Amino acid sequence: MDKLLISGGVPLNGEVRISGAKNAALPLMCAALLTKDPLTLSNAPNLRDISTMLTLLGKMGVAISRAERSVISLDARRLDNPEAPYELVRTMRASILVLGPLVARMGYARVSLPGGCAIGQRPVDLHIKGLQAMGATISVEHGYITVRAERLRGAHLRPGLVTVTGTENLMMAACLAEGITTIENAAREPEVVDLAACLNAMGARIGGAGTGVMTIEGVTALHGATHQIMPDRIETGTFLAAAAATGGEVRLVNTDGALIESVIAKLTQAGAKISCRGTTINLSMSGRPKAVSFETAPFPEFPTDMQAQLMTLDCIADGTGVITETIFENRFMHALELRRLGADIHIAGNAATIRGVAKLSGATVMATDLRASASLVIAGLVADGDTLIDRIYHLDRGYDALESKLGALGARVRRVQ
């Protein structure tokens, strides 16, 4: 199993190109199931989760081609196996996103329940209740969700919780439903807006994307399209946090500061100088960062996927920061590993109090999930000595060529067996 060896103490300096967003790419790939025409996606990241989704779609009968590394063409004309098996769903919870498109186009879907998640509960009951309200017949047995519907009907949907994948699943299903579907309490994340833009380019009629109320007028068929995947806002935030923690100066290209305004605000509060212009973000940091406090919440508030990275920044900051996690109930597991590096972190319920220390010291640590892995990488970059991070397959799920990009910024990092 691969591990990441980091020799810390080097400020990050230079330019890095941000890849396309994983959390946008996965639902966009599922949108190909809604049409018999090809869907071409550019700016696709090279990640394990993308490969897993391609494998899943291929098993369903989708023809896949990649003329270039960052361009994926999906042709679901011969879609003949509307099933998502457990062995693939268990490795990537986003596989549940095939449910809505399959039912909408094929009238049938059989998808494995995702199972547990390390960072907390991610129930799919909101997906199921939404499809039921649209007229689908659903049964759950032997670990699989089976959904049938001759044709879905438009409905007024109001999920009890804001759910990104739930909004995306029901939005895709509604595109081919009869009548109008309204989704209240809809997720407002940029990835949802990106999916809506692609679906509209395919002939869908979606309004209100990016607001709390979306309206989808169903059509009888969608056609193919070409769409560029949005930049990865979490990768953007991760590199900004890493540069700020190491006291470096970086230039990020192929990104958009408007996607992470809440993160930029906290990094600025910590002492970083940040400027955004077009698709470029510049950051410079000198001296020790100041501690920051924040609470995670759905977009446009501070994203839960950046909580771990900012916790690492607080670990070496001047002062004390309090981080409150409101999205996932078990997303502080990285704190235990950061303590191994010398961090002073106290957890009480869903709040973590971090008292900054002058320095961290290298040690062997273990990644527990994708964003926790990123926090440990940042910690290794600032720690004295060597840090060895185990179970970095989590990183490969969500960060495209991370060690290469860090190496180009001067970091001493390499993958070892």
Image (cartoon, rainbow, N blue to C red):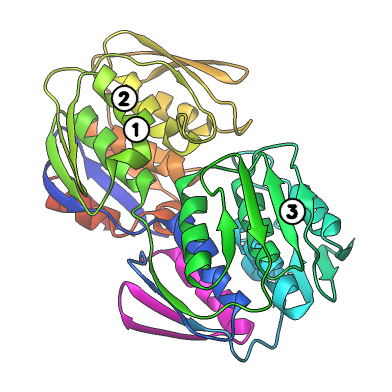
Can you say which quadrant of the picture contains the C terminus? bottom left
Question: Nearest the camera: 301 or 354?
Answer: 301
Question: Mark 1 falls on what kind of element?
Answer: helix
Residue 102 image offset from top left, x and y in percent: 70, 73
The tag earlier along the polypeptide, 3 or 2, is 3
Residue 116 image offset from top left, x and y in percent: 69, 49
Above or below 240: residue 245: above
Residue 58 part of the magenta segment: yes
Characterize the local packing of mark 1: few (<14), some (14-19) or many (20 or more) Cα atoms within 10 angstroms.
some
Q: Which residues are magenta?
A: 46-73
Q: Amino acid at mark 1?
A: Glu
Query: Which residue is disc 1 drawn over?
Result: 261
Q: Amino acid at mark 2?
A: Ala
Characterize the local packing of mark 2: few (<14), some (14-19) or many (20 or more) Cα atoms within 10 angstroms.
few
The mark found on residue 219 in the picture is none
Query: Which residue is disc 2 drawn over?
Result: 265
Q: Are marks 2 and 1 in contact (CB under 8 Å)?
A: yes
Residue 137 image offset from top left, x and y in percent: 89, 65
Q: How many angstroms separate mark 3 from mark 1 (CA)? A: 29 Å
Which quadrant would residue 187 be assigned to in this image? Answer: top right
Residue 9 image offset from top left, x and y in percent: 15, 32
Which quadrant would residue 133 be assigned to in this image? Answer: bottom right
Query: Which residue is disc 3 drawn over?
Result: 127
